[in-house]
Image: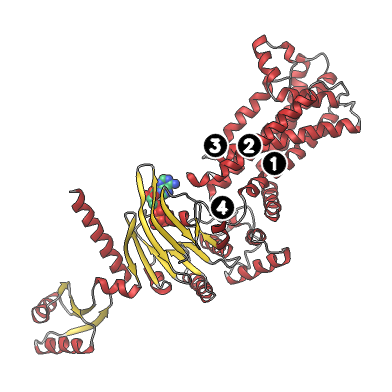
Amino acid sequence: MTASVTMIGRSIRLSRRNFDLVIMAIVLPVLMMALFVYVFGGAISTSVQSYVDYVVPGILVLCTGYGATSTAMSVTDDVQKGVVDRFRSMPISGFSVLTGHVVASVARNALATSAVVLVAVLMGFRPAATVGEWVLAMGLLLLYVLALSWLAAAFGVIARTVESASLLGFFMLFIPYLSSAFVPVATMPPWLRAVSEHQPITPVIETVRALLNGQPVTSGWLALAWSGGLLVVAFGWATWLFGRISRR
Amino acid sequence: MIVETEGLTKRYGSTTVLNGLDLTVAEGAVLALLGPNGAGKTTTIRVLSTLTRPDGGTARVCGFDVVREGADVRGVISLTGQYAAVDEEQTGRENLVMIARLRRFARPAARARAVELLERFGLTDAADRRVRTYSGGMRRRLDLAMSLVARPRLLFLDEPTTGLDPVSRTTMWDAIGDLVRDGVTIFLTTQYLEEADRLADRIVVLHNGGVVADGTADALKNSVGGTRLDLVFSSAEDALRARDVVGGAVDGPTLSVPSDGSAVHLHRVLDDLLAARAGVLRVSAHRPTLDDVFTSLVLADATAMAGVTA
Ligand SMILES: Nc1ncnc2c1ncn2[C@@H]1O[C@H](COP(=O)(O)OP(=O)(O)OP(=O)(O)O)[C@@H](O)[C@H]1O
Ligand SMILES: [Mg+2]
């Protein structure tokens, strides 16, 4: 337990000192949102106002992709640099090393989410959510981010170079476009629509969107099941992989 | 026996790095593992410290199997690897406090321990600078300090003083001496034979995946041969003339004569030369160094190998 706390402190300190990471985590999502709202927004939707309300949950999920990528990269960096060798020769669990990275990742994401919401409000985002709905929406996002961070940690352990860990970003940034993040799935061709409707991101986005805009929630349980399931699988996978580093 | 390996093997792809290594280390001993580059010294340490799994054979540390009881092994060892394992973006102090916390020191004790080690390794002035800005030797010192935070039963040091200046090297040797007095077993590798000579009470030479020599520094030196007298003359001709009188081998103006190291033998050589009117300028006696041992072992092994493959 002390070990996990120490490792969390370490990872947070390291991410505070890595300026690129902070930029990537906060500025990029904000720029993406501006891009969507002002550049594509007019073409996609009837008014800037309604598109902001539509797109914010999508941007929030998109930024979890950035966050996950930098988490995977810092895990790989750690494993490759030999610092992890020191930890692995000490009487602490591999679990605590990864926990440090995951918690720092969640913290970076929380910061990014706050920044996005704040800027969105400046752009005219007027969520109709009650306090309870906000809490539920943020809670679901948190669970999703936690699951994604463990998945990123697992990728980070597998990747042999930081460059290959950054490949995760490619998928993470691509997948949200195949969901209801930026355009309603109804506008997609049937085969793509089938993919989009059944991938884990769509129920998460739909639930967050419904909660924030005060609409009835239809896919809440599905979103919870996907996120919870992903968390359990990713956590088990990441810690299992960490234990297998010695077989390389 | 604090370390016991039996038939330990490790392969990377098609290269066999350890080929049935049998090694035991007694508790409280200082063992120096020598061997040419690529002999498998680092691999041996990585297997014993649970970082790498062996492909065959067994290895026990304090009675715990390194594969099945890794967690128990980690509880009794400490490791400084060949390459500095420090956090570049943390300061020296933060690195040390972090390790102390992971070693279950309470916060104030962790801070105090960090101060102590920074002082000891001459890093007090650089304590609050990020490690990224350290020189290679400073990084190495920090790395060593990090593995001395807690007192282990067995300390692995992989080339602990490579890249250190003479002062830091002495600091490290003193630190090792203190640990030995505390009863800590030291398992080190080194390229500096002087270091092995000075620190180790047992030397093991690794070559081609196995042990080719094992013993005290003195025993190893004796195995290569006795003392050698180097007699320096004013010219090569003089040296050659002297060789006809007392024997030996000539290298320029220097004549090397095998000796038993006794004063009587030295007297006799000098008397004979005086009688032959060969004027000796200087005399020096040489015990074989570990370098000689090392060179002869590795060369002998290489020749033997060449013989096998030919
Ligand atoms: N991870 C690895 N993958 C592939 N080969 C490896 C790996 N680690 C070590 N080797 C190989 O194993 C052999 C022994 O390496 P090792 O690092 O144990 O040697 P060493 O005795 O420590 O050498 P040095 O004195 O240069 O430090 C070398 O041939 C090396 O190339
Ligand atoms: Mg080595």
Image quadrant holding the N terminus of chain B, namely: bottom left
> Between marks 1 and 4, how big is the CA–CA gap?
21 Å
Q: Which residue is mark 4?
A: A88
Q: Earlier in the sequence, mark 3 or mark 1?
A: 1
Q: Alpha-carbon neighbours of circle 3 within 10 Å: few (<14), some, or many (≥20)?
A: few
Quarter of image, res B222: bottom left
Q: Which residue is mark 2?
A: A152
Q: Which residue is mark 1?
A: A105
Q: Nearer the viewer, mark 3 or mark 1?
A: 1
Quarter of image, res A121: top right
Q: Alpha-carbon neighbours of circle 1 within 10 Å: few (<14), some, or many (≥20)?
A: many
Q: Which residue is mark 3?
A: A163
Q: Earlier in the sequence, mark 4 or mark 3?
A: 4
In the displayed structure, does residue B77 sit left or right of residue A108?
Answer: left
The chain carrying label 2 is A
Q: Tell me, yes or no, whether dots 1 and 4 are on the same chain.
A: yes
Where residue B250 sits: x, y (%)? 15, 73
The three-letter code of the residue at mark 2 reads Ala
Label 1, secondary structure: give it.
Answer: helix
Residue under the point 75% across and 23% down = A203
Q: Tell me, yes or no, whether dots 4 and 3 are on the same chain.
A: yes
Where residue A21 sits: x, y (%)? 67, 41
Question: Nearest the camera: B20 or B269?
Answer: B20
Instruction: Kindly check if marks 3 and 1 are in contact, taking CB atoms under 8 A apart as contact.
Output: no
Instruction: Kindly check if marks 1 and 2 are in contact, taking CB atoms under 8 A apart as contact.
Output: yes
> Between marks 1 and 2, how big is the CA–CA gap?
9 Å
Where residue A244 sits: x, y (%)? 53, 44
Residue under the point 65% across and 66% down = B114
The three-letter code of the residue at mark 3 reads Glu
Q: Earlier in the sequence, mark 1 or mark 4?
A: 4
Mark 2 beta carbon near ligand 1 (under 8 Å): no
